[in-house]
Image (cartoon, helix red, strand yellow):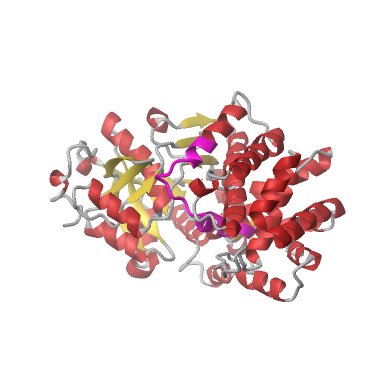
């Protein structure tokens, strides 16, 4: 049996289920990217509002590329899905009921998706598609016109395939229909994610019609957000545990994450918004200091663990936490090399760092280092390189950050410390492979990878002090491996 309106009454009494009348929900938000993180984060906030405050804000869930089965599963179970909170061996589960509709571009057609996005009552289009879904260049935060999908959208603007393309076409249609625009809200891990989203949408709109770009610029808001909840990729083992939580009822759309969740939102919406603050979100005027704090301290340390951990044979973050040298190095990274670069006020960063480390110790999560290591060319700039630029400008130490960059270089070289082949998942994997194959496994490898200007920019790729520090760390990783390199670094901290 699968989760559905018919089987929900058979769930164990411990499971939190929708007690609100789902028929009263109205589709006011179109969400692009029905992945695990959205289900475990924004959808839960909406479900809490509906349960405790009679909110009528419902979702139309959309996947544009990939994830056909996710949408199919959601439709098959009356748009219900479960979210489990994993805290060591203690799990708690709720069934989320705020999804009203679900569409996939390849199954239902882009025209149907655009029709939903042009309904008068649509107030927000939210996004969780990871960094690569924005088709932007991190070094400039502008659109990548060489991206094949962006080229398609420029040539076929009424049948778009990308997130920027779909948003531009939907806004064009609303403008022609005389409808108010919607707010575009990114919930992905990028600094100034609202600014990035605005940049790519306006750039694509200008390619098509400068007057449309002007209208979007004057009428549409792109609030930035900071989202935080660790949601590992779902594994067969996770699915079995979710089914057990549901008393034997299957839920292929179910997800599991840690108990902690945080959402900081720039309060800038042109067509209204849910009262997220009632569910624990923070509405602020400037999200950037919070974004930087999370990206550098949490995501930066996660990447540090991911590359150094995977190289050493640690498959999950909680395994890294069993190595005292890794813990010491990560804490130093957070407090001495990341926290010092931040502008956030009113936050005890030492407490924040210790809270992060405690979250990483959660053995229930099983967050794969390989998953976190994905898409490094997009993640490195905001997680490590911006901080390195701060230290270079201020002539302060960044040994752990340099090691993190070197570990990424060692990781994309394709072999772990035991000689096993690494399955590298990155939008620039072909370029990375070519650079690795064309360079010797020494300082030449470092120089080759630093030639990626869209990652490192012209400044870092030509900064000899930076090059020397990364090269020294890389050669240590090559010669004695990740565990011994981290241990040696800890002796000098």
Give above or below for 372 relative to 291: below
Please give the range of residues in magenta.
Answer: 357-377
Q: Return the x and y of residue 309 as percentages of the image width and height.
A: 58, 53
Nearest the eye: 444 or 125: 444
Quarter of the image holding residue 275? top left
Q: Return the x and y of residue 302 as percentages of the image width and height.
A: 57, 47
Quadrant (top left/top right/bottom left/bottom right) for the N terminus: bottom left
Q: Return the x and y of residue 128 as percentages of the image width and height.
A: 47, 52
Nearest the eye: 455 or 111: 455
Q: Return the x and y of residue 153 as percentages of the image width and height.
A: 53, 68
| Relative side of 269 to 18, left or right | right
Q: Magenta stretch containing residue 48, yes or no?
A: no
Question: In the image as oriented, which residue stretches furthest toward the top?
Answer: 346
Quarter of the image holding residue 424? bottom right
Image point 62% across, 49% down: which residue?
304
Does residue 210 appear in this view? no
Q: Magenta stretch containing residue 364, yes or no?
A: yes
Nearest the eye: 272 or 47: 47
Image point 57% across, 45% down: which residue?
323
| Relative side of 258 to 72, left or right | right
Nearest the eye: 453 or 215: 453
């Amino acid at each position: 049996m699968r989760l559905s309106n018919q089987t929900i009454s058979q769930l164990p009494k411990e499971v939190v289920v929708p007690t609100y009348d789902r028929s009263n929900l109205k589709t006011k938000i179109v969400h692009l990217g029905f992945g695990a993180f959205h289900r475990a984060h924004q959808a839960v906030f909406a479900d809490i509002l509906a349960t405790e405050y009679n909110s009528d804000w419902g979702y139309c869930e959309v996947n544009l590329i990939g994830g056909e089965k996710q949408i199919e599963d959601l439709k098959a179970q009356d748009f219900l899905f479960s979210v489990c909170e994993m805290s060591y061996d203690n799990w708690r589960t709720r069934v989320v009921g705020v999804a009203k509709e679900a569409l996939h571009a390849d199954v239902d057609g882009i025209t149907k998706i655009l029709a939903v996005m042009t309904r008068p009552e649509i107030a927000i289009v939210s996004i969780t598609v990871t960094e690569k879904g924005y088709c932007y260049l991190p070094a400039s935060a502008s659109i990548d016109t060489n991206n094949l999908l962006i080229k398609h959208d420029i040539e076929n603007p009424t049948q778009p395939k990308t997130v920027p393309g779909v948003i531009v076409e939907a806004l064009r249609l609303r403008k022609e229909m005389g409808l108010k625009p919607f707010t575009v809200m990114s919930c992905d891990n990028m600094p100034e994610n609202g600014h990035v989203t605005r940049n790519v949408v306006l750039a694509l709109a200008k390619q098509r019609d400068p007057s449309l770009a002007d209208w979007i610029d004057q009428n549409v808001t792109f609030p930035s957000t900071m989202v935080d909840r660790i949601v590992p990729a779902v594994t067969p083992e996770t699915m079995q545990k979710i089914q057990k939580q549901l008393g034997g009822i299957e839920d292929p759309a179910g997800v599991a994450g840690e108990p902690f969740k945080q959402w900081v939102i720039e309060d800038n919406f042109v067509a209204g918004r849910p009262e997220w603050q009632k569910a624990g979100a923070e509405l602020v005027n400037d999200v950037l200091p919070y974004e930087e704090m999370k990206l550098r301290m949490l995501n930066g340390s996660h990447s540090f663990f991911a590359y150094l951990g995977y190289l050493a044979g640690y498959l999950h973050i909680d395994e890294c936490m069993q190595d005292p040298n890794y813990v010491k190095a990560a804490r130093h990274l957070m407090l001495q090399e990341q926290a010092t670069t931040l502008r956030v006020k009113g936050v005890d960063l030492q407490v924040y760092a210790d809270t992060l480390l405690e979250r990483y110790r959660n053995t229930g999560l099983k967050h794969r280092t390989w998953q976190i290591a994905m898409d490094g060319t997009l993640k490195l700039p905001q997680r490590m390189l911006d901080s390195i630029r701060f230290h270079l400008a201020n002539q302060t130490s960044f040994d752990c950050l340099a090691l993190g960059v070197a570990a990424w270089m060692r990781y994309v070289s394709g072999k772990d410390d035991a000689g096993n082949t690494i399955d590298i998942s990155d939008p620039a994997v072909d370029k990375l492979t070519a650079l690795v194959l064309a360079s010797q496994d020494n300082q030449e490898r470092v120089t080759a990878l630093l030639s990626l200007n869209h990652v490192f920019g012209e400044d870092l790729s030509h900064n000899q002090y930076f090059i020397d520090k990364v090269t020294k760390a890389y050669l240590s990783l090559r010669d004695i491996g990740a565990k011994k390199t981290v241990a040696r670094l800890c002796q000098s901290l």
